[in-house]
Amino acid sequence: MWTSKRRNPWKAAATATALLFASCAATGEGDGFSAGSVLRSIDNDSLANSDDQYTSGVSLSYLPKHERSFADAPLPDAIGDRLDAHWPFADQDERFVIYSLSHRIFTPTDLEAREPVEDDLPYSAFLYGTATVGSQSRDELNAFSLSLGVVGPAALGEEVQRGLHDLIGSREPEGWSHQLENEPLLNLGFEHRRRLHRTGDPQGLGADLLGAVAGSAGNLQTQATLAGTLRMGYRVPSNFHMQSHFLAEESLGIRAYDRPEKPRSLYAFTGFAATAIANAIFLDGNTFSGSHSVDHDHYVLRGSVGVAGQYGPLLATISYERASLPWDHPEGLDEESFLRLGLSWDF
């Protein structure tokens, strides 16, 4: 089905895993468990034997410990005080802040074409930072986010993709000279997550069902999403980590409301997300100047299946994700897939 050149998937997986663990070489003074979390994740569709559409992504997030008020969180005093005074979910007694930096790359299927590929994605890369503020109770979570960044050559997509392709021995992309032009990015988002059901023993075998509604607006993407995730296994945590809308804050919900002294868990999960899209710059092209773009439908369906495990401060996840393509692909493809590797460390 996939048109990409065959490659050794074990070599690709080893390369991505090495990059992930190398990115975790950070040191600092910790003040006990849950003082803060660092999450690194890698998405790459070469691990799923393809190399097109959403081709790769890397995200680095920092989640300080949860507080009873935003005034105690790492925020400017004026912002923290204002949030506490006007926060619409005052009954949720754990409040948090997340800071993240993300890099994403999109390409057409035909990487050997030197001209824009009609009816397929433009080359594009995104580099952006996101600040998220939110709160949670045992069964609900709400969060607002602000993302700022850049699309275009300044995001260094060509350099990143060529470097990765050199490492894994893949073909070189030839169309980066036609990528989207430099443009600043601004996006606002909101997400609500809820534990719909829980069964079994929290300290043994059990399961839960999480649901979410989310929306975002800006020139990166404007969308609305309905999502759900079913988790089953040993000591399924009381957190809200689940599949959500595409390009969302990946560390949202990773810290449990009820935190055991020595957390240990192993569980499988499967999820879905249905998204209605008003605009997405990786489909519609530059907002303020002419560029290559692709006509598309206004909905996307995604599914995922994976495994997560936690031992003490370490949380590792691996998932396989598959999504519908919302445009008439020139080679008849109607879906794409990629593998996501995630690693979180509490210190």
Image: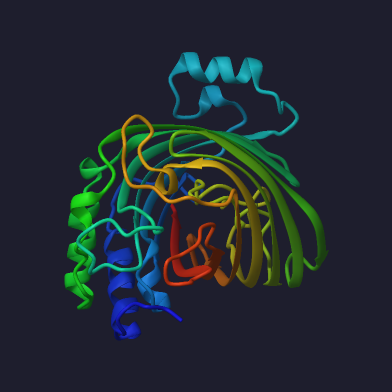
Which of the pair 129/169 is nearer the observer? 169
- Residue in the image at 31% along x and 68% along y: 110
- Residue in the image at 30% along x and 81% along y: 5
**Quadrant position of residue 210:** bottom right
Which of the pair 275/258 is nearer the observer? 275
- Residue in the image at 72% along x and 26% along y: 90
**Quadrant position of residue 22:** bottom left
| 237, above or below 220, in the image | below
How is the rendered protein coloured? rainbow
Residue 94 position, x and y percent, is: 64, 36
Q: How many marks?
A: 0
Image position of 182 (left or right of 302): left
Residue 214 position, x and y percent, is: 64, 42
Image position of 242 (left or right of 313): right
- Residue in the image at 50% along x and 29% along y: 73
Residue 233 position, x and y percent, is: 69, 74
Residue 76 position, x and y percent, is: 43, 20
| 321, above or below 115, in the image | below
